[in-house]
Image (cartoon, rainbow, N blue to C red):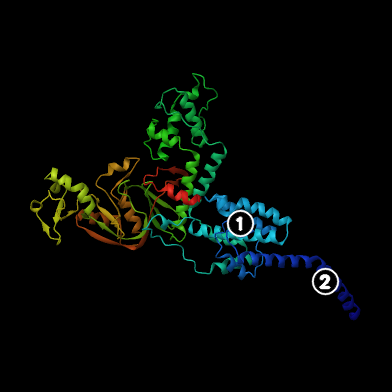
Amino acid sequence: MSRIFFARHFVIARVLLLCLGHIFGPVVAQAEAVSDQIKDLVGTVSAESAALQNTNLDAADLLPKLYDAREYRPAWGEEGSVEVLFRALDKGVAQGFTPADFHIPELLERYKKAKAGGAWEKATFDVLAMDAAIKLINYSIFGKVNPGDFDKDWNFARPVIERDPVQVITQYLDGQGFAALMALIDLENPQYQGLVDALETYRQFALNGSWPEVPSETVLKPGMSEPAVAVLRHRLAAEGALNEGQILPSTIDEGDPAQVYDDRLEVDVKAFQARHGLEADGAIGPKTFAVLNRSVEDRINQIRLSLERARWLFRDEESEYVLVNIAGARTYLARADGSVWTTRSITGSQYRKTPVFRDEIQYMEFNPTWTVPASIFRKDKLARIRKDPGYLDRGNYIVRNQEGAVIPASSVNWGADNPRVTLVQQPGPNNALGLVKFMFPNKYAVYLHDTNDRTLFGRNERNLSSGCVRVEYPFELAGLLMEGDPEWNSARMQSILDSGKTVRINLPKPMPVLLTYWTAWVEDGEVHFREDIYGRDKRILTALDR
């Protein structure tokens, strides 16, 4: 019985193998043919390649190494893997990149040809798909644009890649798959995800037909009745900024209630003005008209720029950090529990810009002195001293010579182009730094600090300083930064302040501080926009679209 059993199964096995040979023989042969074509293709891969003559393969240096590690096996030969790739590329576009960045139109066309074609068509699609995948990985980790090309002082560290990219990509393609690799790379920062959602929303506004331009011939105020008011309602509705219950125009006849600037519309206009850094007074004048009539494409690009800038910042950031948005004049403390503390700030003017850089807050100084920077001394203080001999006494300034010794102000020739002295403002209520400063020693002499003039925080446009960052609620920030010190409390801080003496307090641990520049960001679920006061967006957008 056993001989008959094994003999019977031996015959079945031979027949089965013969059948499988007929089925898989051509498949194996075709796979080998595709591999041969890939090997030939990546051996000469360049913009002049006969197969890809109109395509710029940005990963041309990495492709041969990657395929060599794979023994030139195709990576995207299965329909499921191709679907995963296209979903990942679509997600890349949703994060502010363009379809052209990943050859998506050409990829779709070549995929159709590959499905119906031979080894050459399959190989050219595979190589192009691999180039797109590599670019997606690279852009997602580092950003598409190199910030160092636009700022010679850029000092944010690029993410450290600890493993050979060829090894990692090969491992995932042959193992968990490309989706698992992209999940590992995805940036989970809440601000970044909020901007991704905002981009989707504003791209939908564009698909819906953008929004109308509001006629700007007449200043619009509450209580007025004008045809332009009806257009204003349409404009706000197109951006989702018109509350439910508002009247949308059905006609343009005189007496149409949609043309009346009523109380409900005033509430929406004020909210719109606040989101755009305008005086929220409900009156629509030149500044508000200019903001209303910025195109939806402009807003989309502002969001895309903020996403790119976020990729530069957040890849390797710690769980807690202070972030200053220079363009938005706001300061944030992101905490380990996911909460975010926020305060208004005053940042550098168009002529005295706050620099973009990363550092660490190491200590605080209560009742600080202020050594007037040489540039401010020459441009501001010297003229005031010449006109007003009592200016130094009222401001509680002392004068130091080049050796650092205190000298009488009367001994200085203030009429000279350069009196060669230094002004130091002593601690007190009139000190320009207020009662506390947050120190991260740097070559720009820029830091966060209190102020002696809190009225400026009430302004909507707060790019007013000489480069440093003034914080509206500095003592709250001080308490948060000192939470790791069991001996620190508000009573101790008040005692130091009351002493009037300059006291240095080291933080329990250094706190990363990021000074960045966003003209669009998300806060409390709403998208905020600001004007590009430093004129930085255009050049970076050109590079992002290149």
Q: Residue at x 45, y 37 (%)?
A: 294
Is disc 2 placed on a helix, strand or loop? helix
Q: Amino acid at mark 2?
A: Leu
Q: Amino acid at mark 1?
A: Gln
Q: Are marks 1 and 2 in contact (CB under 8 Å)?
A: no
Where residue 61 appears, x then y in whole percent? 55, 65
* Image-based side of 292 in relation to 84, left or right: left
Where residue 72 appears, x then y in whole percent? 65, 68
**Label 2 crowd (10 A; few <14 / some 14-19 / many >=20):** few
> What is the quadrant of residue 123 in the picture?
bottom right
The front one of 439 and 517 is 517
Q: Quadrant of the N terminus?
A: bottom right
Where residue 393 appears, x then y in whole percent? 13, 48
Q: Residue at x 90, y 81 (%)?
A: 3
**Which residue is identified by label 1?**
53
Is residue 294 visible in the rendered image? The answer is yes
In the rendered structure, find residue 525 and report the number of the disc placed on it: none
**Which residue is identified by label 2?**
17
The front one of 123 and 528 is 123
